[in-house]
Image (spheres, coloured by chain):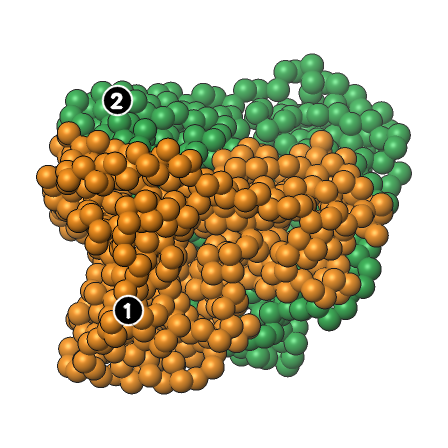
Chain colours: A orange, B green
């Protein structure tokens, strides 16, 4: 057996059975092995950023890593921005990158580059496989490394001769390390703070934003009067269906500090201490108000869900109550605005949906419009690097057959990785993309003023404007094989969403916002 | 004056007056300064790989660097693959990357990443500006560093507070270092080899592939009987109009070794010793046949054109003769094949055109069909990282108003950086894209067999096939504002090329190859 086949067999034996791929010459033996290892589902992408963004979306819902297959330094570089997002989402991801044959590298041929340095700049674990005999073990190590905890990027570089040489042997699956429990003293210390009668904010994030964590956090808040907040860009936020509706920490620092005003204690449960996303002149980067004492209940390497449950029990909090039925907004009509768009989404969101949110400024009203609706999972742009939405929706759909994926995608952001649509068409994935066309980098128009950049004349504004020419997303989507229609009223949007939710396969609706 | 304005004024004062940009929040002060520094032409791109690919194409024709403007680590990562190509093309490029404010970095906010490590993996020179007072000098240093020789990537990282703080001062332009002459002894030693009567191959590359270098090389070959070859992927190859037609070193090793068969001496003039692009099992990577003595006349850091001229003079070679009028192929008709496509291009290529070649397998017949035509410059994929053609064509057109840019673009490669079309429309650039649709990664189908990858069954083949669904490039191009038509016969292609060459602005012709 050659190294490539040993690698592939080790991956599937380690429960990594989806690979988002964009291979080149140095990965041809991996590709050839697909015919002998039918347990691996290989999903072709037209651009590497689609592969890693899909692996991110997949891992968020599957709870296990996907593999990627990338070609040399340029392939890894093209995938890097969505690796960054996956890193911030703390999902497991096994990143397989082909390299030139070991003996070929001294020739510094045209496609040679600093692949190792590039991998190091984005990976928590990396290794370059040296021999076909070892690549199975390398792959098993990569899988276990990817689990962390917390989940992380494990990059395995595979030179072409390691793939094609004989002597490969699949390695046995390694045990996934458990997520350690928080020590009882920590829980007791935090319980004391919550019992003190002082003003406490409980800020949750990470794994705490799913059913069990939300329930425990809500019990704690009810029992103690603590204020409950959650992080701004969660990896997976389970919502609707009567789950506790948690207020998000605001994106902008002033608003976040207002949420924390008069707090005496800040308890972190899977979330980091608040700091601003960007720096601004004369505005603080550290958003923890002076005089607030910060307590960490659980960091990302600990079982935050169990810690919240133990804390709730220690506080003698009541069990979760019945889940009141939520309410949906009415079906909207008339002008298509961010509000009526949100109402259409909230009115129609299917039960069990996955919402992938790269809506940037345009999606501001959607969370409120969906909080009372059916149960769904919300995936946010955890690393802030745009171009993640369409790929993550692709991977989420691969991970969740039978669930409708709704991708809220801003027009500027969509153009970074639009190629994801082709993979959605090819795989027949149930993804509905609402392409939010405000025809600008709207957030930057706001930021230009916000950073105090003087001038804001015509030439600066032109850098933030996407009107010239207007992007026709219906044409772009159809060009990649995804059916598409344009909505210019709320009625049209609602009708198109209804149609897409009732049909199998992908569809894009360009929502031209007034 | 703030740092951003000092940076911008230093760039334009250093003759860097085009900036291919995709800015974010941390670059807003640079954007705002555009209104105060009207000498800088800022060209907006929708994806960072378009910006760097355009800067590559621009530098190849302008003979000076463009600047880029990129946003943080993800922006640099998205631009990396085309920086790799620019690095291999040895063009000067001033890569400006915004960073978080210096004091903000300790918060490790969501968009923070290993920007320095990433920059190091692709740049020959890099610096992170520390103070508004110094950023002008930093920029002047970056510009001069980019010139080399040879040309290289100089990356200047600019934290947001360095941009917005006052105290900036534009720095004076630094003198560009001259390209050193080759020592006379080297020329004399190579002249001896050429006079020896033994079998010599003169392999030229780099700057030698423009008029003066080609003329000198042809004189040497005529005077000595040496065989003249040129590198496979030239940065700029001036062709047609009676210029010496130089045989290219073949891409595949066996063919290249056949070209070098029975050679006793290999003289390198701006080219590297031949090695194979990829490694293959049981095939050599080193393509210099055993027994061949290699002599370097001039490397990339020396003035190869002057060296060839001096060598020709030392050999008493005749001056260049008259340039015989070339011949164009007849206008083709009937089926649209790689051959009839090439004939249509050869029949119609405008005088003074710039050909950007990312045709991969489909363009194999175009060089022969254009060799006898009018004078043109040919830009090859110097670094081998696909997704360079459309961006490079964009930058080449910015550098060459009044010249028609013809981009020969393979379908698989086009999908990496298709966003370039939007910038072509926005800027009204005279680019004609012939989109060569064979609906596969055809080269990989060949490579799969060539690397000896057994199997080649259905699942492997599916990874190399782009039929499901078919990409509709007419729809994709129109979606980005570039007029587009489809050609399915040679007659249609010729008529559409004729139309595009006669009109201002961009057009895309999807050539569906039989």
Mark 2, mark 1: which one is toward the viewer? 1
Query: Is disc 1 on the same chain as disc 2?
Result: no
Left or right? Give the position of B185 relative to B495.
right
Label 1, residues with CA under 10 Å away: few <14, some 14-19, many ≥20: few
- Look at mark 2 in the image and give the residue it sits on: B131
Q: Nearer the viewer, residue A508 or B23?
A: A508
Residue B407: image location, x then y, percent: 51, 59
> How many angstroms separate mark 2 from mark 1 (CA)?
58 Å
Q: Residue at x 53, y 29 (%)?
A: B150
The subunit letter for the residue under badge 1 reads A
Q: Residue at x 64, y 46 (%)?
A: A175
> Number of marks in the image?
2
Residue A2: image location, x then y, percent: 81, 50
Left or right? Give the position of B501 relative to B187.
left
The subunit letter for the residue under badge 2 reads B
Label 2, residues with CA under 10 Å away: few <14, some 14-19, many ≥20: many
Residue B117: image location, x then y, percent: 47, 31
Residue A322: assigned label = 1
Residue A335: assigned label = none
**On screen, A146 above or below A334?**
above
Q: Nearer the viewer, residue A406 or A323?
A: A323
Mark 1 lies on a secondary structure that is loop
Decide: marks 2, 1 in contact (CB < 8 A)? no
**On screen, A513 above or below B264?**
below
Q: In the rendered image, is residue B295 in sight?
A: yes
Q: Nearer the viewer, residue A512 or B14?
A: A512
When asked about the image quadrant of residue A114, the answer is top right
When asked about the image quadrant of residue B426, the answer is bottom left
The quadrant of the picture occupied by the C terminus of chain A is: bottom left
Q: Residue at x 49, y 35 (%)?
A: A121
Q: In the rendered image, is residue B109 in sight?
A: no
Left or right? Give the position of A495 relative to A81.
left
């Amino acid at each position: 057996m050659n190294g490539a086949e040993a690698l592939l067999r080790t991956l599937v034996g380690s429960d990594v059975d989806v690979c988002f791929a964009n291979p080149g010459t140095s990965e041809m033996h991996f590709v050839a092995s697909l015919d002998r290892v039918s347990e691996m589902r290989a999903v072709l992408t037209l651009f590497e950023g689609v592969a890693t963004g899909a692996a991110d979306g997949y891992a968020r819902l599957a709870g296990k890593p996907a593999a990627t297959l990338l070609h040399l330094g340029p392939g890894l570089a093209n995938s890097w921005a969505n690796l960054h997002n996956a890193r911030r989402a703390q999902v497991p991801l096994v990143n397989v990158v082909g390299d030139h044959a070991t003996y070929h590298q001294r020739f510094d041929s045209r496609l040679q580059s600093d692949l190792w340095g590039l991998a190091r700049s984005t990976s928590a674990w990396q290794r370059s496989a040296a021999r076909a005999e070892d690549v199975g073990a390398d792959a098993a190590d990569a899988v276990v490394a990817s689990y962390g905890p917390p989940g992380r990027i494990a990059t395995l570089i595979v030179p072409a001769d390691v793939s094609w040489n004989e002597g490969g042997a699949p390695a046995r699956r390694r045990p996934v390390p458990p997520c350690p429990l928080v020590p009882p003293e920590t829980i007791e210390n935090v319980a004391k703070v919550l019992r003190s009668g002082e003003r406490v904010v409980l800020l949750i994030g990470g794994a705490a934003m799913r059913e069990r964590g939300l329930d425990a956090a809500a019990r704690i808040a009810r029992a103690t009067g603590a204020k409950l907040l959650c992080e701004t860009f969660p990896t997976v936020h389970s919502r609707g269906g009567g789950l506790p509706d948690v207020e998000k920490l605001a994106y902008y620092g002033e608003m976040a500090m207002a949420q924390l005003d008069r707090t005496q204690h800040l308890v972190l449960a899977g979330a980091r201490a608040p700091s601003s996303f960007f720096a601004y002149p004369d505005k603080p980067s550290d958003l923890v108000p002076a005089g607030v004492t910060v307590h960490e209940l659980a960091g990302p390497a600990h079982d935050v869900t169990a810690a919240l449950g133990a804390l709730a029990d220690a506080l003698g909090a009541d069990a979760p109550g019945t889940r009141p039925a939520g309410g949906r907004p009415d079906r909207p009509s008339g002008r298509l605005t961010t509000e009526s768009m949100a109402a259409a989404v909230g009115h129609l969101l299917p039960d069990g949906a996955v919402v992938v949110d790269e809506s940037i400024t345009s999606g501001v009203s959607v969370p409120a419009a969906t909080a009372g609706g059916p149960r769904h999972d919300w995936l946010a742009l955890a690393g802030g690097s745009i171009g993640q939405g369409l790929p993550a929706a692709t991977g989420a759909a691969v991970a969740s057959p039978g669930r409708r994926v709704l991708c809220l995608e801003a027009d500027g952001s969509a153009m970074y990785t639009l190629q994801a649509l082709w993979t959605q068409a090819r795989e027949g994935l149930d993804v509905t993309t609402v392409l939010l066309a405000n025809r600008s980098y709207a957030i930057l128009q706001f930021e230009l003023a916000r950073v105090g950049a003087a001038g804001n004349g015509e030439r600066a504004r032109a850098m933030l404007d996407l009107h010239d020419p207007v992007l026709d997303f219906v044409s772009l989507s159809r060009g990649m094989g995804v059916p598409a229609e344009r909505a210019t009223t709320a009625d049209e949007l609602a009708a198109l969403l209804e149609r897409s939710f009732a049909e199998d396969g992908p569809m894009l609706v360009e929502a031209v916002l007034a």
